[in-house]
Image: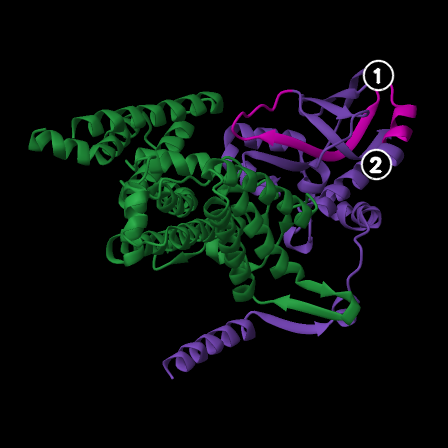
């Protein structure tokens, strides 16, 4: 009789545990809404429809550097974005300047605020634009591969559609307007000669 | 040995911790702050869970090198079941797991892997070092197979609470590790199983002759170590909100270091859970201090190794004097 009680209690515990552990659904119903993530169209939509509003409101690079030099913590917190922990932050900036030199991998500008800025024209990689945009919410993505693919597709579009027309017309002395993303490390702060990953580039007539 | 020397030997880990804290407080003004204290406590919670399990194993004169991989496997299984459930395409069936269910599955996996370790060690007389070394590779491989090499991320706020939440002003991981420690203290000091563990580690033949079922005790101990590695896996996965396939690499070494620094004899039969907790705190404080002092990660490895070596030498010397 004692054994019956013992086994009975175990059956109740196991039944209770299982009841609270699993639930069953039809697989066809559960998996139907799942769509594969299309990073290319996401990137296209981001660049065409969402980023213009961000770049329009972006701080000028000269103003950003002035603020960073005087109040770095406030500037990083107000304008910096990042999807990861650590001291690296990305900033969406805009600016204008005159072309001082054209190299194989970048174009050097002297901005209206007399800062040297290098516009990347060859090696457009990394997550600068994606992260600086402040448009990405990690919880919207089920895996990090999708997130990486957004950057990859954004950079691909920039390399294909933004840089070639710019490189075709830019010359030393040209006046240029740009928007783009820069990366700064708050722990090793250096605002000398920053590299801008461009979002838009315009050579003024 | 005089009474004073005896007491000194008994509290050597505690004294070492106090000295370490004093030195670090002098060298870094960020060390002795409340935030840093909680930070250290959060970080050592995982090692405490694993090291408590390791202590039980070492007390039986065994070793478990698989705990880091088991941690990763259990974290991945918990995260995978919570996020993706199990598909049964042939029956058009989806089996979803509640938070409770996914956690139970992770803990059961850890226990099962640990029990398997114990089984191979007792049934086939495979040395614990070899059996658990093999399991280290097997569990890591299973983790990579299950995750396909990708992290399983975004697991929900309720799950994240386990690793990042606060309860009554104390981080949840600290509560969990405290419960683990208290449970293990009761187990080792107040239960028959605890006495058997010490007896087996002290003299296995004598324990066998006195009627203790060695295999049963050892399998139970390895299962407990596996379950505690799974608890560590839950904490790590929850804290990162992501099950990483390469989580827990070399965690077994930190756990063994905590056990050794805490005064548990690697030949078994001697040691306490509180000692291991102290050992884990010393390692945690040392790690934290070295980071605060901007010591290169390469040097950190050297310093940690030297501290472990020193602890063993002191332990051997004091054992000789007893």
* Residue B158 in sight here: no
The span picked out in magenta is: A163-192
Near-viewer residue (A77 or B290): B290
Colour given to chain A in the rendered image: purple
Q: Residue at x 44, y 77 (%)?
A: A7
Q: Residue at x 55, y 65 (%)?
A: B101
Splitting the image into 4 quarters, where does residue A6 fall? bottom left
State which chain disc 2 sits on. Answer: A
Crowd rating for badge 2 (residues with CA inside 10 Å; few <14, some 14–19, many 20+): some
Q: Which mark is residue A156?
A: 2
Residue designated by label 1: A172
Task: Tell me the quadrant of the picture where the N terminus of chain B can be found.
Answer: top left
Q: Position of residue A18 (x, y in %)?
A: 55, 72
Quadrant location of the C terminus of chain B? Answer: top left
Q: Is residue B262 left or right of residue A131?
A: left
Relative to A149, residue B105 above or below: below
- In depth, the one of B97 and B188 nearer the eye is B188
How many numbered marks, from 0 up? 2
- Give the residue displayed 46% in from the left and 37% down from the top: B127
Q: Nearer the viewer, residue B207 or B288?
A: B207
Q: Which residue is at 30% across, 35% downward? A: B265
- What's the colour of chain B in the image? green
Whether residue B26 appears in this view of the structure is yes
Residue B223 in the image, given as x and y percentages of width and height? 45, 53
């Amino acid at each position: 009789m004692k054994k019956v009680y013992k086994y009975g209690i175990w059956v109740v515990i196991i039944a209770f545990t299982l009841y609270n552990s699993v639930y069953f659904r039809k697989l066809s119903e559960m998996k139907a809404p799942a769509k594969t993530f299309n990073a290319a169209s996401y990137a296209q939509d981001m660049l065409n429809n969402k980023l213009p509003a961000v770049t329009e409101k972006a701080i000028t690079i000269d103003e950003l550097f002035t603020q960073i030099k005087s109040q770095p913590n406030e500037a990083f917190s107000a304008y910096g974005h990042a999807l990861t922990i650590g001291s690296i932050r990305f900033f969406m900036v805009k600016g204008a300047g005159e072309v001082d030199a054209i190299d194989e991998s970048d174009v050097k500008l002297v901005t209206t605020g007399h800062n040297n800025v290098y516009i990347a024209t060859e090696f457009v990689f990394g997550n600068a634009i994606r992260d600086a945009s402040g448009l990405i919410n990690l919880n919207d993505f089920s895996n990090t591969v999708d997130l990486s693919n957004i950057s990859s597709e954004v950079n691909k579009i920039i390399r294909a559609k933004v840089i070639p027309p710019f490189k075709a017309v830019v010359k030393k002395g040209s006046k240029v307007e740009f928007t783009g993303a820069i990366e700064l490390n708050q722990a090793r702060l250096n605002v000398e000669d920053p590299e801008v990953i461009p979002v838009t580039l315009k050579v003024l007539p | 040995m005089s009474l004073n020397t005896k007491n000194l030997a008994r509290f050597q880990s505690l004294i070492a911790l106090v000295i370490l804290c004093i030195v670090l407080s002098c060298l870094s003004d960020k060390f002795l702050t409340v935030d840093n204290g909680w930070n250290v406590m959060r970080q050592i919670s995982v090692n405490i869970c694993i090291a408590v399990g390791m202590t039980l194993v070492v007390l039986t004169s065994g070793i478990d090198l698989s705990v880091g991989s088991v941690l990763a496997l259990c974290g991945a299984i918990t995260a995978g079941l919570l996020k993706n459930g199990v598909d049964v395409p042939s029956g058009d069936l989806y089996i979803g797991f509640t938070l409770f269910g996914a956690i139970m599955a992770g803990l059961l996996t850890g226990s099962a892997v640990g029990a398997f370790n114990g089984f191979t060690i007792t049934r086939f007389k495979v040395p614990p070092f070899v059996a658990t070394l093999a399991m280290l590779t097997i569990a890591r491989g299973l983790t990579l197979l299950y995750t396909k090499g990708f992290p399983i991320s975004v697991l929900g706020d309720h799950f994240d609470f386990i690793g990042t939440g606060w309860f009554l002003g104390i981080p949840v991981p600290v509560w969990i590790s405290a419960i683990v420690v208290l449970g293990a203290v009761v187990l080792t000091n107040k239960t028959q199983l605890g006495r058997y563990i010490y007896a087996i580690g002290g003299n296995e033949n004598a324990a066998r002759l006195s009627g203790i079922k060695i295999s049963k005790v050892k399998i139970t101990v390895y299962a407990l170590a596996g379950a505690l590695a799974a608890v560590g896996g839950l904490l790590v996965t929850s804290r990162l909100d992501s099950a990483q396939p390469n989580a827990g690499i070399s965690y077994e070494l930190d756990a063994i270091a905590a056990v050794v620094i805490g005064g548990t004899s690697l030949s078994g039969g001697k040691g306490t859970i509180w000692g291991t907790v102290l050992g884990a705190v010393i390692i945690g404080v040392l790690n934290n201090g070295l980071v605060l002092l901007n010591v290169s990660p390469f040097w950190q490895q050297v310093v940690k190794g030297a501290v472990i070596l020193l602890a063993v030498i002191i332990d051997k010397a004091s054992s000789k004097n007893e």
